[in-house]
Amino acid sequence: MLPRLRAFALSLTRSAVEADDLVQGACERALQSLHTFQQGTNFDAWLFRIVRNLWIDNFRRTRHETLVDTTEPEHDRPGEDGRHTVEVRGTLQMVAQAMDRLPEEQRSTLVLVCVDGLSYRDAAEVLGVPIGTVMSRLARARQSVIAASGEAESGKVFGRTRKAGESL
Amino acid sequence: MSGSGPMDGSEWTDEMLMAFVDGELDQHTTARIASAVAAEPALAQRVDDFRESSRLAREVFGKALSEPVPDRLVDAILSETNVVPLKQRRSLSQRLLPLAASVMLVAGFGAGLWFGERSDGAGGQLLEGGEIAALLATQPSGPAAEVSVGGQSARLSVLGSYEVVDGLCRMFRLDYAEDAVRGIACDHGSGFGVEMAVADTAGSGFSPASERATSMADAYLDSIEAGAPLDAADEARLLGEHAKK
């Protein structure tokens, strides 16, 4: 469970150190509010929600950042190994960068469902949004992931992205 | 492949295809999409893309999932709860470390709680050999009994019994020579399993219960909607009933 909480925290903070601080704080808060946990409800979702709430209360406001426009061209790929990096690694780097550029709400939804394995319903509960919102965020996030992967594989960093649903 | 109708891929929104991949749709819709996907390569490609996107996201975040949780984080959480005060109480920490590790896997965080679910791995540490489980099933609250846990002798006291919806829970305390553990074990119909355990403050001779261990045990009892402590007669009756099962 701790690793899953860390992955979610990382999707919020985008910094490993901050993510660990967040998880630690969330565990402390969970202990203090153990009595508020409703037996019969989803314990995992309850913990994830505490992580998110704590992030909103204490962590997010310390960041002076604006959301990056996801259509903005990304800076050059790190090319320390020259251009003959293993293709898979290149793809993953592109995907990681694409995920990094996602709006926070898309990235955290993506991680909750695809990485942490939450159902749409549980993710909706954690994020405090309707299931339809979870689905539209998730679909957009995954289209960005696929676009990044497609770009990497075609070797075009700034190539045109395939629209979701567009026939090949 | 144009026109309208269920076989036209354009009918299926991205959200629907994604939910199909994620197994979030009802049986009927799932079957409809599955047959549409089988008939239409373009649709199959969109479905593959959603499947692949999930795999890629997992791979990117795989490091966070697979790398060991840093000691700093584990220490901080455990010390917060007095479960394993690593520095001050080495002997206790050694005994509890496997327990704590299981706790984190089972309960989800290093709070020193097994929460709700019975854990064979974690509970097994304390219940190894069946001696304690047998005592929990029979011993009345109050008097302590000598037991052996992992080769060390200890005294087991049951502090109270509580009815829950589907069974019986008992709060116990295990006193070692210098340390103590407070826990809750429940029998939901298949024998007693430890569901929660925390280190209890202990000293040589006189050892007052740690306030935090007590309140955590109470919070756990509240969370499983346990009833008030049973009196001796009710406890004996319920233990007898459970023994027959």
Image (cartoon, helix red, strand yellow):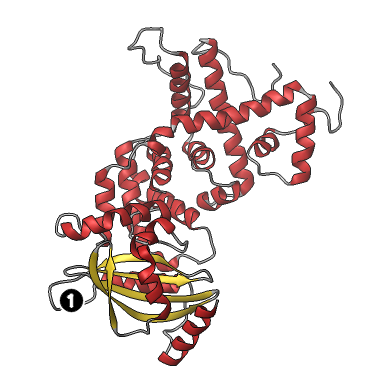
Q: Position of residue B204 (x, y in %)?
A: 12, 73
Q: Position of residue B75 (x, y in %)?
A: 24, 51
User: In the image shown, does B209 or A9 lie closer to the viewer?
Assistant: B209
Location of the C terminus of chain B by quadrant is bottom right
In the rendered image of this protein, does residue A131 appear above or below residue B225?
above
Q: Residue at x 40, y 74 (%)?
A: B134
Picture quadrant where residue A85 is located: top left
What's the residue type where badge 1 is placed?
Answer: Ser
Q: Which residue is mark 1?
A: B207
In the rendered image of this protein, does residue B29 appear above or below residue B79?
above
Q: Position of residue B197 (x, y in %)?
A: 34, 65
User: In the image shown, does B94 or B228 lie closer to the viewer?
Assistant: B94
In this rendering, does residue A83 appear at all?
yes
Picture quadrant where residue B93 is located: bottom left
Q: Is residue B198 found left or right of B137 in the rendered image?
A: left
Q: Residue at x 37, y 53 (%)?
A: B102
Q: What chain letter is assigned to the residue under label 1?
A: B
Q: Secondary structure at mark 1?
A: loop
In this rendering, does residue A102 appear at all?
no
Q: Residue furthest top?
A: A83
Q: Is residue A49 found left or right of B53 in the rendered image?
A: left
- Label 1 crowd (10 A; few <14 / some 14-19 / many >=20): some
Total labels drawn:
1
Q: Residue at x 77, y 27 (%)?
A: B38
Q: Residue at x 38, y 35 (%)?
A: A14
User: In the image shown, does A109 or B50 lie closer to the viewer?
Assistant: B50
Q: Is residue B61 found left or right of B33 in the rendered image?
A: left
Q: Position of residue A75 (x, y in %)?
A: 40, 17
